[in-house]
Amino acid sequence: MTTPASPEGSSTTGGQPQDHNPWAPPPSSSSPAGEVRPLPYPVPTGQPRNGMGITALVLGLVGLVLGLFIILFWISWLPALLAVVFGSIGVSQARKGLTTNKPMAVTGLVMGIVGLLISVGSAVFAVVTVKHVVDEARAKVKESKEERKSAAAEEKARHLSFGETYTFGNGLKVTVAEPAPFTPDAFAHGHAKGNKAVQVTVTVVNTGKERVSVPTGLPDVNDADGASAELVIDGSGRQKVITGYVLPGRTAVGKYAFSLPPAAADRMEVEFSPDAMRWDDAYWSGPTH
């Protein structure tokens, strides 16, 4: 029996064409001979690229936690910003079907944005707080300088020359006249032979609307060397001490005599306050002529 001749250009061996590929999928019975059927299993396309989403989630969490601490705002912005960058890349890759963790990338992106907002808010709060503290410190320094300047001006205002007037806080206007020569009588007390005796006249005017007490109506006198001068008391009746109250619009005049040593009698200083417990002394100074 002869074998049927095969078509021209091909040969058969054991009923199969010699160019048959044994590894090729068999042809479908419903398809034309030689047409390749689809494979019965999916062809792998490579591992999913989920690294961006994971990184965005971790960085977003770090940035968010650091942002909750106001003093760490200066470092919290960096991981939050990186979370936004990596989260955006992860979302983009998920849309292309390259990743399987799109929710993780979205979460990292959102946490990064929130972390950036918290970082910016913390920075603004820190700047405002520091500015407030600095402004308060400057205000206190300025106030302290003004107080010192005011105190210096007040101190200067309380040092006057004879004949000038100083008004105390209770409304009493006080003037100390230039010292006048005083001759003690034979029964004077507090005057040593050879000393120079002078009379000090203190005039107090009540410029207020209520009577004012003058509990300390006696002045203190210092000689040119700064030593306290002796108060002279004699029987002439020329001395007069201011005591009691000064009525509104009224004037009280005190006259006092003091003895100065010859070596320090060319100048003197008078200290006076109508109420030493409430008001600092004012000072009048000048030559004794």
Image (cartoon, grey):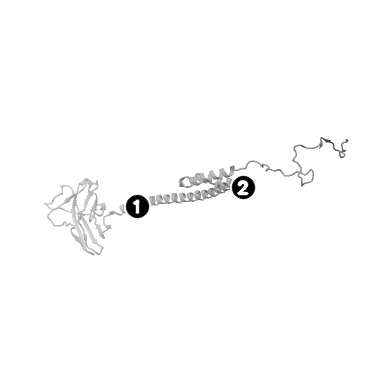
Residue type at the position of mark 2: Ala
Q: Position of residue 125 (x, y in %)?
A: 46, 51
* Residue 289 visible in the shown view: no
Task: Kindly identify which residue carries mark 1.
Answer: 147
Q: Position of residue 248 (x, y in %)?
A: 23, 64
Q: Is residue 184 found left or right of 206 in the rendered image?
A: left
In the rendered image, residue 37, in percent from the top left (x then y), is placed at 74, 44
User: Percent from the top left, x then y, of residue 278?
Assistant: 24, 54
Secondary element at tag 1: helix
Q: Residue furthest front?
A: 1
Q: Is residue 220 visible?
A: yes
Give the residue drawn at x 34%, y 52%.
147
Of residues 98 and 155, the one nearer the viewer is 98
Point 34% across, 53% down: residue: 150
* Residue nearest the viewer, comparing 50 with 248: 50
Foreground of the two, 246 or 58 = 58
Q: How many marks?
A: 2
Q: Mark 2 packing: few (<14 Cα in 10 Å), some, or many (20+)?
A: many
Label 2 and label 1: CA atoms lie apart by: 69 Å
Quadrant placement of the N terminus: top right
Give neighbour class at mark 1: few <14, some 14-19, many 20+ (Cα, 10 Å): few
Label 2 or label 1, whichever lies nearer to me, is 2
Question: Residue 94, which numbered label?
Answer: 2
Q: Does residue 225 appear to the left or right of 184 in the view shown?
A: right
On residue 201, the disc is none
User: Decide: marks 2, 1 in contact (CB < 8 A)?
Assistant: no
Q: Nearer the viewer, residue 83 or 200?
A: 83
| Dot placed on the residue nearer the N-terminal end, 2 or 1 | 2
Amino acid bearing label 1: Glu
**Circle 2: element type:** helix
